[in-house]
Structures are given as C-alpha cells and as structure tokens.
C-alpha cells in the first residue's frame, strides 16, 4: 500500500527553493533573473500562492490562454513555458508535484541579421584624430563581434591579457556554458587589435573594452554604446545579438563554413542550436541554383511559354 503525503507548500515558496537549488548548481545570475522575471510575470494570470500539488494541467492551459489573449508573441510565451516546465520538472524530482508541463509549440521565425550595406556603414573606420575614444572602441567592438560571433557577456569580460596576437587567438574565459574557449583572430582583426591596444594601453588585467572609468562595461553600458554608435551611422538595427546571427549567416552562406566548425566558434555545447542556423542559412540550397531552378531552366531553354 502506498501512502501519498500531501504537500502544502505554495508554488511561490517552492519556486524560491528552486532558485536556491539552481544557484547552488552554478547557473548564471542572468539565467536566474530570467527565471524570476518569467515566474513573476505569469503570476498575473495564475495563483502561485496555492499549494504546489494543487496546480493542474488545466491551470497551465488557462495561463497560456491568458498570455495569448494579451497578444504576447508566441516566442515570448514559449520562453515563459520553458521556465515553468523547468520549475515543475525540479518539483517532480523533489516529490512536490506530479505535473508535467509540455513545451509550447510556436512558429520559428527567420533570424534577423544585418545587411551587407548596414555592415559597410558600421565597419567604416572613424578618423582617429577627430573621434572620441568611445567611438573608436565601439568600432573595434563591432569588428570583434563579426570576427568571432561571441555573446555580449563574453565580450565584456575579455581582458587585455586574453589577446594573443602572435598566435592569432583570443581567450574567452566567460562563456554561457562556463567552458573556456579559444577564438581565432583573422589577419584583419589582428591588425585592428594591434593598433587598438597601442591606443587603449592599460595593464594585462584591464578589460579590453572599458567604460569611461577604465572599468568593466556593464550590460546596459554596452547596449547603449552600440545603440548610439549604430544610429549615428544611420543603422536603425541596434541589437548586439544580431551580430551573432549575422556571423552565423555569413559564415555559412558567404564563407562556405560547416556546421561542426560553427558549433565550436559559437561555443554551443551541442549541435542542436547550431543546426537551427544551418536549417535557415543553408548554403547547399543556394549553391549552383541557377542550374537547378525550374524557372531558370525554362527561361534558358528553347521552349516558350504561351499565355492563352
């Protein structure tokens, strides 16, 4: 005979324990903050103060319905549900709930990237005799993002000592998966960094891209800096993460790169995330398409299409 012990802890209290457990596992503060924001946001539509084992699948369905009625994008709803699913998966492991939360299905959108014309405007080198150091720094940052495809958090944590111009590499010591990574520097990037370090100076322990007080740039500081820089160049797109998408697109389509190398360059733990880029930016589909397109074949053949 099995005896089920009822749990009267509220979902809200259990969520606090969930955050504590995940923090003990070493999850990044940004990930924990994302969990908290999603949980509190959904609290407008579902009562998290009731016992956790009283929450049923229907309550989650009602939550999704409310989120859709509010006009939230499907991708946003999916992000919320990932947090809720992760929380209840942990709760099941702790014997607090038996609820299984399914993932929310949504239409995958085409990842936006910077156009070649926008990149041309952003990559035009400023006049070093006339510009402020911040503009020069931002220009080097743009080049670095397009050289490596790294995340903003990784870029903010690069120090002068992480640049090895002789070997042509940059050490990424702060990554999302907490694994140190070596990123290659192309010849152009080495030349840019060599010149930049002469102007930037500082000690080996200083951050490569500092704020105005020679300290580490905060997330908001970097975001604002790129927004101002892009708009000053006449580019309305201002997302830092778009440079990562742009790197992936150009690497696969324009440079003929492969998925396995791209996985290493982007620092993905598995090929799954990289595969999404490959499915969207598929160079095999575009290659030699003039000889494979039915329209092209018809137009270049001797046959004529008559309109009746």
Image (tube, grey):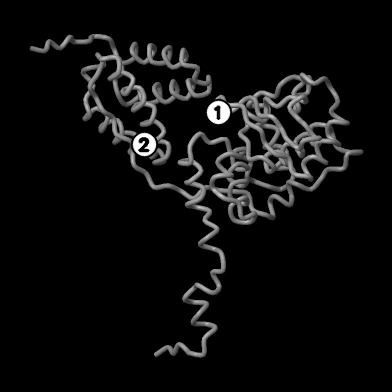
- Spot the residue most to the front: 167
Q: Give the SS element for disc 2.
A: loop
Residue 269 image position (x, y, % from top left): 51, 34
In the depicted structure, whether residue 34 falls above or below residue 102: above
Q: Give the SS element for disc 1.
A: loop
Q: What numbered label is drawn on residue 70?
A: 2
Which of the two marks, 2 or 1, is nearer to us in this view?
A: 1
Which residue lies at the image location 73% right of the left edge and 46% below the top edge? 122
Asked which quadrant contains residue 18, the reply is top left
Residue 75 image position (x, y, % from top left): 42, 40
Residue identified by numbered label 1: 176
Which residue lies at the image location 77% right of the left edge and 25% below the top edge? 160
Which residue lies at the image location 69% right of the left edge and 29% below the top edge? 171
Residue 104 image position (x, y, % from top left): 33, 38
Asked which quadrant contains residue 127, the reply is top right
The 10 Å Cα crowd at callout 2, few under 14, some 14 to 19, many 20 or more, is few
Task: Estimate the spatial distance between the alpha carbons at disc 2 and disc 1, rounded to whole Å.
Answer: 32 Å
In the depicted structure, whether residue 35 falls above or below residue 263: above
- Spot the residue most to the right: 129
The N terminus sits in image quarter: top left
Left or right of 62? Residue 302 is: right
């Amino acid at each position: 005979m099995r005896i089920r012990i009822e749990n009267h802890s509220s979902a809200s209290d259990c969520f606090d324990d969930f955050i504590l457990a995940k923090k003990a596992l070493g999850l990044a503060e940004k990930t924990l903050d994302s969990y908290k924001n999603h949980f509190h946001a959904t609290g407008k539509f579902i009562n998290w103060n009731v016992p956790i084992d009283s929450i049923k699948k229907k309550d989650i369905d009602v939550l999704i319905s409310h989120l859709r009625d509010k006009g939230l994008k499907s991708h946003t709803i999916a992000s919320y549900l990932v947090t809720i699913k992760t929380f209840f998966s942990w709760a099941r492991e702790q014997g607090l709930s038996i609820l299984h939360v399914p993932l929310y299905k949504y239409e995958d959108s085409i990842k936006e990237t910077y156009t070649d014309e926008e990149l041309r405007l952003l990559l035009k080198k400023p006049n070093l005799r006339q510009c402020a150091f911040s503009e020069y720094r931002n220009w080097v940052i743009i080049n670095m993002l397009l050289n490596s495809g790294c995340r903003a958090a990784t870029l903010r944590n690069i120090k002068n000592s992480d640049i090895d111009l002789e070997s042509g590499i940059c050490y990424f010591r702060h990554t999302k998966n907490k694994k140190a990574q070596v990123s290659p520097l192309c010849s152009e990037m080495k030349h840019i960094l060599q010149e930049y370090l002469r102007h930037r100076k500082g000690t080996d322990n200083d951050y490569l891209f500092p704020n105005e007080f020679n300290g580490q740039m905060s997330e908001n500081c970097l975001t604002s800096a790129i927004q101002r820089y892009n708009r000053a160049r006449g580019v309305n797109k201002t997302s830092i993460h778009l440079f990562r998408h742009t790197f992936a697109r150009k690497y696969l389509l324009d440079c003929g790169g492969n998925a396995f190398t791209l996985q290493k360059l982007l620092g993905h733990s598995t090929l799954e995330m990289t595969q999404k880029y490959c499915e969207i930016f598929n160079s095999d589909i575009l290659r030699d398409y003039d000889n494979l397109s039915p329209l092209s074949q018809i137009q270049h053949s001797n046959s004529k299409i008559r309109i009746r």
